[in-house]
Amino acid sequence: MLRPPAVADQFYPGDKHRLSETVTALTPQVAAGDKIKALAVIVPHAGYVYSGRTAGATFARVEIPENIVILGPNHHGRGASLAIMSKGAWVMPMGEVPLNTALSELIKAKNPAVTEDNEAHRYEHSLEVQVPFLQAAQSRLAISPLAVGQLSFAQARDAGHFLAAAIREFGQPVLLVASTDMTHYQDRESAARQDRLALDRILQLDPEGLYRAVLDHGISMCGFIPTTIVLIAALELGARHASLVEYTDSGAISGDTTRVVAYAGLTIT
């Protein structure tokens, strides 16, 4: 299957040259020797005008390998709760990105809850907006995209465990990308206070604590389940440290701090 972009000219420029220039402008220059080998990153997925600098700053910190697993929330509710695409390519403005069939098939084989489901990805933006940043950094990019619906913590724990097992068996460097925005549509102070509860759990590498904090405090972090899965997988792959690259909100661009969407970028090493 060739998947066309769903949100080009909405969340990011649809013209190849404008998009390349935009990604370059949003991504600070970091010398190759200063980049870290990360197991995972957590990045936002709003329109580039709002969250692109946070995403760019986070991706710039790490070495981008050829093999990427992107997990994001299924905003539309279409398809399976753990939906992967394993064959074909995503047709993006900056060029086609092949799907990593070998890694995706391993992910499916390890976890029977993962379903081949193109429909879940057809209109989903949370994974798509990450791809141009990855393309700009890695010319041999291949992705395994996983759209995530509602899961219990036990289901998320299993998904993270099986994902780590698939990556170990794959045997090549893989970067996990968790796509999430933080608190939605609260004033800046309330959003920051809520998000600190979630970010503290991420920084402590505490996936169950993150999951419980979001539910217990009603934090509108849309990708907390993909982030939980990624934290679990990263821990099984040897993660020892999490670092906050940037925290900001839409008010930094719009000037309206009474009703913001917040964004965070983090690295897991």
Image (tube, rainbow, N blue to C red):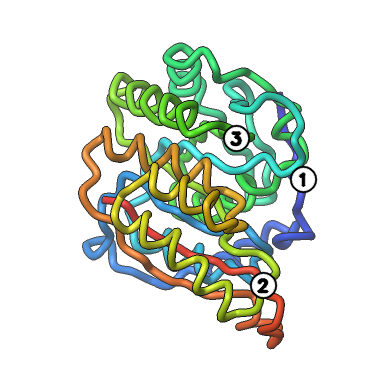
| Disc 3: which residue | 148
Mark 2 or 3: in front is 2
Tell me the quarter of the image containing the N terminus: top right
Question: Residue 169 in the image: x percent, y percent?
Answer: 30, 19
Tag of residue 186? 2
Q: Residue at x 50, y 16 (%)?
A: 108
Is 243 situated left or right of 19 in this image?
Answer: left
Tell me where residue 208 sits by quadrant. top left
The tag earlier along the polypeptide, 3 or 1, is 1
Q: Amino acid at mark 2?
A: Gln
Secondary element type, mark 1: loop
The tag earlier along the polypeptide, 2 or 3, is 3
Question: Residue 7 in the image: x percent, y percent?
Answer: 76, 51
Secondary element type, mark 2: strand
Mark 2 or 1: in front is 2
Q: Is residue 61 above or below residue 111?
A: below
Q: Residue at x 57, y 22 (%)?
A: 86
Tag of residue 97? none
Q: Amino acid at mark 1?
A: Ala
Question: Residue 24 in the image: x percent, y percent?
Answer: 53, 68
Tell me where residue 32 sits by quadrant. bottom left
Secondary element type, mark 3: strand
Q: Amino acid at mark 3?
A: Val
Is 217 situated left or right of 76 in this image?
Answer: left
| Disc 1: which residue | 6
Is 217 situated left or right of 204 in this image?
Answer: right
Q: Is residue 75 above or below residue 25?
A: above
The tag earlier along the polypeptide, 2 or 1, is 1
43 or 187, which is in the foreground?
187
Outermost residue, front side: 216
